[in-house]
Image (cartoon, rainbow, N blue to C red):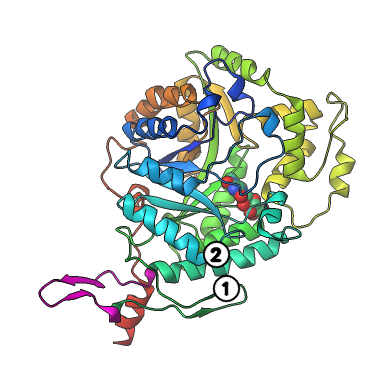
Amino acid sequence: MTDTRRQLTLNLFIYPGGHHEAAWRYLAAEPERALDITYYQDLARKAEAAKLDAVFFADGPALPDKIRFGPRVRPEPITWLTAIAVATSRIGLIGTASTSYYEPYNLVRLFASLDHISGGRAGWNIVTTSAENAAFNFGQPAQQPHAERYQRAAEFVDVVSKLWDSWEDDALVIDKAAGIYADETRIHDIEHIGPHFRVKGALTVPRSPQGRPVYVQAGSSPAGRSFAARYAEAIFTAHQTIDSARAFYADVKAQAAALGRDPDHIRILPGISPFIASTEAEARQLQQEIDDLIQPAYSISQLRDFTGIDLTGYDLDAPFPQHLIDQHTTRGHTSRTQLIFDLVRSEGLTIRQLIRRLAGARGHYVVAGTPEQIADIIEAWGTSGAADGFNVMPPWLTGGFDRFAEHVVPILRQRGLFREDYTSTTLRGHFGLPRPDSQFATALRKSA
Ligand SMILES: Cc1cc2nc3c(=O)[nH]c(=O)nc-3n(C[C@H](O)[C@H](O)[C@H](O)COP(=O)(O)O)c2cc1C
């Protein structure tokens, strides 16, 4: 595989307490600070000091039913990122919001405000939401099928793109003498009428410093991949092996090129959850310590959320009952469901072995080693067509990230794989992405 050496993208994916489901019980964890904004501002400043590209927040518009066993509280990410924006100056701010449970006009205003407040550092992680219970919080009797969620998502992104473009870059005049604040001929109603949305007007604020927020996408099924090839500028994805990541990377980049997009304008970012210590043995010991805090009731509940299969009451040390996979309804199940089924089939795991594999980061790549070993893995994936960087998912916070920032990032920098310092003030700039023109301005130039 050719060495495609270039600057890697590294985001800090922040999860209350850390990504390991039992991390909140670990000695050094601070679960009582899950709703303390200064905890997240401090983390973001550490990530900025390490020159990372962005902090990343997931979201789910429903309370998981396993809250008894872990700090899965979910503050709304856009408001949370706004508080982080004013405590930082360079780090990107990527928040997750679901196309299934927003209206385009509301979402556009929230992210446009974040982009203005932060000077162009906002990114939107576009999800359609696989958690079944979210539908019940929005008056829906049942979750929309997988394929329909993506159809709605495609129209949703078309609408928000028009809204973010509805002000041309030079629409604001602010001529006190002439008494002209804005040139209304450069502000366009979008007049959208479609199967899911009808939206008339222009946006309520001018275009942001980076044109519009960066489109990040999280969804890796065939439908998710074609959606990503069409819209995504960064893709968050879960892979257990470098080969799986390479296949995904090649597929999505090829699909994007076939659509006439520049494949370099899509940053593919698998998750990585590293246990880091000065020796590999100590790193594995650390992983074992936190794994031993696992509460199977939580793990079984999370497994049911991901697969629809409830193993409550099953012997944990018995093999995973594969016949249940065959019976599983294929209601367009998600890529995460598929990843778990593939893991069970390929490794013949017991239920306990499976829940320990998923405990670290819900199916993302978990690794234990020295800083050099972690850097070697990042370099191997990042220079062989498996990744353009990573969403770093520290198993526990904040110590798990401190070790990454203090010991792994400098090695990547020495190897020429990561920036010495920021050269841009926007998230687009950090990702090496072009600033898009307003589609209205482009159309007008073409028709002139
Ligand atoms: C890496 C990854 C991260 C995700 N994060 C979220 C999230 O934070 N909130 C959410 O509602 N859905 C999340 N999802 C689920 C997506 O919303 C998506 O709709 C679902 O997985 C179905 O897409 P897929 O089958 O194409 O992966 C995530 C999916 C992936 C693959």
340 sits left or right of 183 in the view: right
Percent of width and height locating residue 116: 32, 55
Percent of width and height locating residue 69: 69, 28
Residue closest to the eye, 12 or 434: 12
**Which tag, 1 or 2, sits closer to the chain's start?**
2
Are the residues tagged 1 and 2 within 8 Å (C-beta)? Answer: yes
Which element type, helix, strand or loop, lies under badge 2?
loop
Crowding near the residue tagged with mark 1, few <14, some 14–19, many ≥20 C-alpha atoms within 10 Å: some
Write down the region rendered in magenta: 165-185
| Relative height, residue 97 to residue 358 (above, below) | below
Cβ of disc 1 within 8 Å of ligand 1? no
Outermost residue to the bottom: 448
| Relative height, residue 176 to residue 15 (above, below) | below
Evaluate whether residue 259 shows in this view: no
Cβ of disc 2 within 8 Å of ligand 1? no
Q: Amino acid at mark 2?
A: Glu
| Relative height, residue 74 to residue 141 (above, below) | above
Q: Name which quarter of the figure residue 245 lies in.
A: top right
Rendered image: mark on residue 197: 1
Q: Residue at x 80, y 55 (%)?
A: 330
Q: CA distance from mark 1 to mark 2?
A: 8 Å
139 sits left or right of 317 in the view: left
* Quadrant of the snapshot with the C terminus: bottom left
Q: Which residue is mark 2?
A: 103
Which element type, helix, strand or loop, lies under badge 1?
loop
230 sits left or right of 184 in the view: right
Crowding near the residue tagged with mark 2, few <14, some 14–19, many ≥20 C-alpha atoms within 10 Å: some
